[in-house]
Image (cartoon, rainbow, N blue to C red):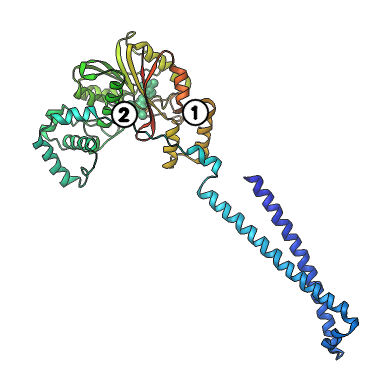
Amino acid sequence: MSATRDSDAERVAALEREQAERIAQAHAAAAAAQDKTYWLDRWGVDLNALMQRPGASELRAAVRAAREVKRRAVRIKRAVDRRREEARSARRAEAVAPPEHRRSVFQRTISPDSLRASPVTDLLYERVDDADVAAVAALAEEHHPHELDVPDAAERHRKTIHLGVHHGVPGVLEATGLTQATPPEGVHSMSRGPGAAGGSLYYADMVADGLAQAGIGLAAGGSVLDFGCSSGRVVRVLAAAYPGCEWYGCDPIPEAIAWAREHIPEVEFLDGPGRPPLPFDDGQLDAAFAISIWSHFAEPAAKAWLAEMHRIIRPGGVLWLSTHGLQSVVHDRGRRLRSEEQLTEISAALNKAGFWYAPEFGEKGDFGVIDPEWGTAFLTPEWLLAAVTPQWRVAAFAPGRLEDNQDLYVLHRP
Ligand SMILES: C[S@@+](CC[C@H](N)C(=O)[O-])C[C@H]1O[C@@H](n2cnc3c(N)ncnc32)[C@H](O)[C@@H]1O
């Protein structure tokens, strides 16, 4: 782009120089013609009569040449103005939208639209009496107008449960097994407010659905780890829905684990180490899930933790994980979360190496987690396939499944 701009500037400068020269010539010729006219006038010579005479041809030619030079000067000036305006509008257009070669890397037609089932919400909602659903609807009308006016039934049921928990509707609390306990502001949690009361039904649905795709039905029991659970917003909902399972959660933020231990007794919470191993025996678990965890590891840590998951999950077991990928580039661009330059850098790294990482939490760390290998990571399916096969088989892949952003992988250990 800058090379084109430079050559534009050079051409405009050359045209301006030519224009200046020709205008000067025109002025000189016009002055000479004026001078002649003046003296002819002073001497009482009739110019029209003079022009008719055979010897006047030289004078006529000089006047014509002066007029022609003037006309050319006007044409050149117009051309220069036009080029300037074109260059200005090209720059304006580029500021609004990036050039085609850069725009193309941010466009995708793969739509995140598989694994849309809602097994946890369905299970919990069925347990709630109609009278309690009506009680929640009345409270919603009063306190959260239009909150339940959503066409998607699963989404409406999720909201009904969350609002029922938020307002402490006894029938909803009793039927679902969810509680009103909410981490205070200083304790790490990825969602808060009335729409998140009792935990995250949205992610509990996504986890249960993904595990079922790989043959792990939670109603049958089993032992499952929420790897990087924070204060437990997802595992608490799963534990309420499937009390027959052994539930574990681990995270390196001590306050989050302490709060979860105190308020969610159905789950065993562990202080997570920065690096493997975890305190599980080989093959002890049926499954583990990790929401937005591999979206933060640098490459060595990402590989080390994949190997650790392979150690602690039994043959036939499942690892559910999410990552930032190509869809996240589109997501971040649409919401202007990153600059065009950085998105171009990320896309280029994904094309070249399948992995991009930056230690974005800096010296302060992420809620106290200070680790040069804990920042922000983007990775491609190619990178993940190369890293996990043949130890794992891919049971499901859903690009952008998490909030139209992160990709979901469900891996089955043969
Ligand atoms: C983006 S949050 C996601 C939390 C949780 N999965 C959820 O969806 O609510 C990332 C979590 O990973 C945790 N974390 C940081 N380093 C970790 C590590 N080495 N192993 C496991 N979790 C880690 C952070 O403390 C944080 O709670």
Alpha-carbon span between mark 2 and mark 1: 27 Å
Q: Amino acid at mark 1?
A: Trp
- The residue identified by callout 2 is 115
Among all residues in the image, which is located at the extreme top? 282
Q: Which quarter shows the C terminus?
A: top left
Report helix, strand or loop for mark 2: loop
Q: Quadrant of residue 152?
A: top left
Residue name at image x 65 percent, y 47 percent: 4
- Mark 1, residues whose alpha carbon is within 10 Å: few (<14), some, or many (≥20)? many
Depth order, front residue of 363/190: 190
Q: Is residue 23 above or below residue 93?
A: below
Secondary structure found at label 1: strand
Task: Establish if 271 lies above or below 180.
Answer: above
Looking at this view, name the residue that lies furthest to the bottom. 44
The reply to whether residue 233 is in sight is no
* Residue 211 point in image, percent of width and height: 29, 21
User: Is residue 27 shown to the viewer in this render?
Assistant: yes
Q: Residue at x 52, y 29 (%)?
A: 351
Q: Residues within 10 Å of mark 2 (few under 14, many from 20)?
A: some
> Which image quarter: residue 167?
top left
Say whether marks 2 and 1 touch (CB < 8 Å): no
Is 6 left or right of 232, judged from the image as shown?
A: right
Circle on res. 356: 1
Question: Where residue 352 appears, x then y in whole percent?
Answer: 54, 27
Please state which amino acid type lies under the numbered disc 2. Answer: Leu
Decide if residue 70 is on the left or right side of residue 133.
right
Q: Earlier in the sequence, mark 2 or mark 1?
A: 2
Residue 61, image quadrant: bottom right
Quadrant of the rendered image holding ligand 1: top left
Mark nearest the camera among 2 and 1 is 2
Give x and y (percent) for residue 113: 34, 33
